[in-house]
Amino acid sequence: MRHLLFFTFILWAHCSVTLNAQLLMDPPIYPGQDRSYPFHDAAGSADTTALYKTDPSIVAWATGYTNLSYGVGVADNWKTPSKALGPAEGSAFDIVTLGRGGQITLTFAKPITDGAGFDFAVFENGFSDHYMELAWVEVSSDGVHFVRFPCFSYTNSPVGGYGNVSPSEIHGFAGKYQAGYGTPFDLSQLQLAYDAANDGTDDVFTDEYQASLLDNFVHLNIDAITHVRREDVVGDGSRPRDDGNVVDAEGIQGAVIYDPYKTFGSAGFDLDAVAVVHQLDATGSEQSITFAEIGNRRIGDGSFQLSATATSGLPVSYVLISGPALISSSAITPIGLGQVVLQAIQAGDATYAAASPATRGFYIADELQHIFIKPPSNQVVGATNVPFDVVSSSGLPVSLFVSDGPEEAFVTEFGHLFNSGPELGSVTLRASSAGGENGGVVYAPATDVIVYFDLVGSGSAAAPQSFAAWQSSQAISAPPENDSDGDGFSDLEEYAAGTAPKDASDRPASGFSREVDGDDYILELSLDSQAQVDWDVQTAEDLSDDDAWSSIIPEIIEVSEVNGGSSSLQTLKLRVAKTGSAQQFWRLEFETK
């Protein structure tokens, strides 16, 4: 703890040069602000305005986007604007990342109106109460003239790439609350701010912000907001036009904004969703659109049909939002490589009101790819630099993250080395690959793969167990390839599956089945969470040649967890592709670790 022997000035910042560049003894309060510093605190505290993602006051969500501009530091796998539409997920991954200085504008099926209290809320994906990536929030009634909400930052020094910001020192920015909790905004604040600026009774706003407010508010109808724009704050305090002059002509310290800087890969504001609390009432009966997700496509696959339906039975039409494709009626034709975003629309009729558009996105690439990760066994707390086996079928790098688990548990993104930290708990790993070019072939992003395991104490009944220790517990000592109960499975396979090696009726649940749609095959196997075993899927076309077997990278299509007794099983469904040969064989090869 640092003890200060001298008095300390608090530097405060007012966004969008909305505050004069000087130090004030008392925190400013602009007209309409519901409280002064310290501001509302973290989600879950007694003093918070955080709106949870399932709050019953939420009546709708954003349905479309426009004017998307990515800033610096965004990997392709985070450039997914369609994930900002619809309800908030409250996860780290179902988001679009704006990058440093990026922006996006969301639209709505029905305009937002000024009701009692807060009118809409913006959801980010902060992983804690104090990790905040901030964005300015602006609204418009015509998509041209935008009015920014005044806001304050009292963070008085730079914040490192993954450092902390206190919610009680932030007001008026999106991103104030952790994932799953929205930052709410009240449109009446803009009216009160405008009134004060217009009659000259406000002395807080800078000339620049006041001029913008006066120029744009006259085009705003706070009872009919059609567009909500977020612009990422570059939180290093170096942008004088947006953050205030760090040093003005007289050398006076000015207002700056700090948030985590620099971050990489998913730098800047991560938008999960925008919720609507008050909206214009629709005329006519309600209807909705059902539109299945569209998988990534090879450009060589050619045109395909879209299929969406409306609950009203009225016909659905399609609009291309962006990307290298053409739409004719319900047929879509790829004409290049990249991300395609489109909407299914039903405009209503004399009986039915317009449905909320359904937005879908997918990638067109030369080739598709998938990720394969061998589900880890349980790990003992205190484990360090444990290697996890993660690859992509394209040969492109795979990012690995701890998406849920004890606070100090982490895995290196590309080295895939896991460190548990000191706490017990369950860990969720997420593997992703952004796609890109390898060997002259452009690959689409892979579908993320999620696996689970537990962090346990060394003496726990669920602790990982070596094959030798398992043999001792089962009173067997033969080599791993021995089949003690004669059920057709080796002792090593029984160890991997968590079955009894001396009970022929307790057999590993693994095998192949023909996939109904297509020529591929599905392999199912179960792995005991305590077994420290390595394994591969291998294929060959000639059983007479033992050297013909080679390892392949199967596609994980499902991972499910089954708890039982002191241990648990993970059941995997893997897709293995048929090569087109007259005959093809597959096998599982197990090795002890």
Image: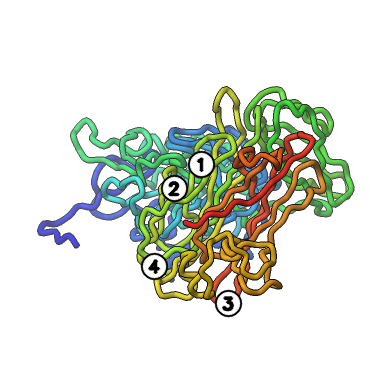
- Decide: is 298 above or below 574: above
User: Identity of the amino acid at label 1?
Assistant: Val
Dots 1 and 2: beta carbons under 8 Å? yes
The numbered mark, 3 or 2, whose residue comes first in the sequence reads 2
Within 10 Å of the Cα at label 2, are there few (<14), some (14-19), or many (20+) other Cα atoms? many
Residue 419, given in percent of the width and then of the height, sits at 38, 56
Numbered circle sitting on residue 565: 3
Between the residue at mark 3 and the residue at mark 2, the CA separation in whole angstroms equals: 30 Å
* Neighbours of disc 4 within 10 Å: few (<14), some (14-19), many (20+): some
Q: Earlier in the sequence, mark 1 or mark 4?
A: 1
Upstream in the sequence, badge 3 or badge 4?
4
Horizontal side of 154 relative to 380 (left or right) equals: left
Q: Nearer the viewer, residue 281 or 393?
A: 393
Marks 1 and 2, the one that precedes in the sequence: 1
Secondary structure category for the residue under label 2: loop
Assess whether mark 4 and mark 3 are in contact (beta carbons under 8 angstroms): no
Mark closer to the observer (3, 2): 3
Secondary structure of the residue carrying tag 4 is: loop
Element under disc 3: loop
Q: Residue 424: x, y in percent?
A: 42, 69
From the image, tell me which residue sits under label 1. 398
Residue for badge 4: 423
| Crowding at mark 1 (Cα within 10 Å: few <14, some 14-19, many 20+) | many
State whether residue 514 appears in this view. Answer: yes
Q: Nearer the viewer, mark 1 or mark 3?
A: 3
Residue 416 is marked as 2
In the rendered image, residue 510, in percent from the top left (x then y), is placed at: 69, 59
60 or 100, which lies in front? 100
